[in-house]
């Protein structure tokens, strides 16, 4: 099961190493406590998580803009809990969210241990669709930046995963070869199928035990990477 030909390991950031859902809930809780204490954060989050995922899916394929992503995911979530709020207030919450989100630094269980394990054996890299400034803050604040030789984001590459161009950009930046590289991420579409279509190997971080095709490599916990690497 080991993959002896691998030299370069590419990770997604959000939902793979950086616990986006937990950090996002803490951020909204802080914002609502300050300005909208009548909102029940857990009720909001239940609606927000799938809405945010769908907005990001549309953003991946350039069906909505960055600005529409930031607005729609909030507006649709407030509508889903029947909370009346102005566009001006939504813009304020959106700005506060981007500002405060990187201050919460929860990583998935096993992140530091597996990065310590991999660091001496492989060249480690990040490929993320997230916004550059926010992603660098997340990495710095959670103290994982030193593990990675390169960080590729969609703003640098001009396209988003699963577009093969972003994988080619990341490979060029890393001076890595496709046949010696592997992508690890939580999105079947963006990370796994995107990487496989671009000519890299891939491992699906399947924390939620989604039923997938048998040929796709998967792990349910980050420390299971030791089986492959």
Image (cartoon, rainbow, N blue to C red):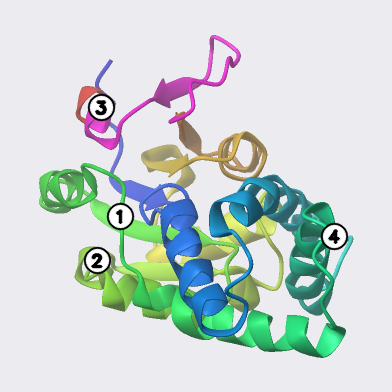
Residue 79: mark in rendering: 4
Callout 3: 10 Å neighbours few (<14), some, many (20+)?
Answer: some
Residue bearing mark 1: 107
Q: Element type at marker 4?
A: helix
Q: Is residue 9 above or below residue 69?
A: above
Please report contact status of discs 2 and 1: CB closer than 8 Å, yes or no: yes
Can residue 190 be seen here? The reply is yes
Q: Element type at marker 3?
A: helix
Callout 1: 10 Å neighbours few (<14), some, many (20+)?
Answer: many
Q: What separation in Å lies between label 3 and label 4 (alpha carbons)?
A: 40 Å
In the foreground, 45 or 124 = 45
Residue found 51% across the figure and 83% down from its top? 34
Residue bearing mark 3: 224
Q: Is residue 161 above or below residue 195?
A: below
Please report contact status of discs 3 and 4: CB closer than 8 Å, yes or no: no
Q: What separation in Å lies between label 2 and label 1 (alpha carbons)?
A: 10 Å
């Amino acid at each position: 099961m080991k993959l002896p030909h691998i030299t370069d390991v590419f990770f997604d950031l959000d939902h793979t190493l950086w616990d986006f859902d937990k950090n996002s809930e803490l951020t909204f809780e802080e914002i609502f406590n300050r300005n909208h204490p009548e909102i029940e954060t857990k009720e909001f989050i239940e609606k927000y998580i799938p809405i945010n995922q769908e907005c990001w899916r549309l953003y991946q394929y350039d069906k909505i803009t960055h600005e529409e992503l930031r607005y729609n995911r909030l507006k649709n979530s407030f509508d889903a809990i029947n909370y009346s709020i102005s566009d001006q207030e939504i813009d304020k919450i959106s700005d506060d969210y981007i500002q405060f989100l990187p201050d919460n630094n929860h990583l998935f269980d096993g992140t530091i241990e597996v990065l310590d394990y991999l660091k001496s054996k492989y060249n480690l890299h990040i490929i993320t669709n997230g916004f550059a400034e926010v992603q660098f803050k997340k990495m710095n604040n959670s103290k994982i930046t030193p593990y990675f030789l390169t960080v590729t984001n969609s703003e640098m590459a001009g396209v988003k995963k699963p577009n093969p161009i972003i994988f080619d950009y990341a490979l060029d930046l890393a001076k890595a070869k496709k046949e010696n590289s592997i992508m690890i991420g939580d999105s079947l579409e963006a990370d796994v199928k995107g990487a496989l279509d671009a000519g890299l190997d891939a491992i699906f971080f399947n924390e939620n035990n989604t039923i997938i095709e048998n040929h796709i490599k998967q792990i349910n916990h980050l420390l299971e990477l030791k089986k492959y690497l």
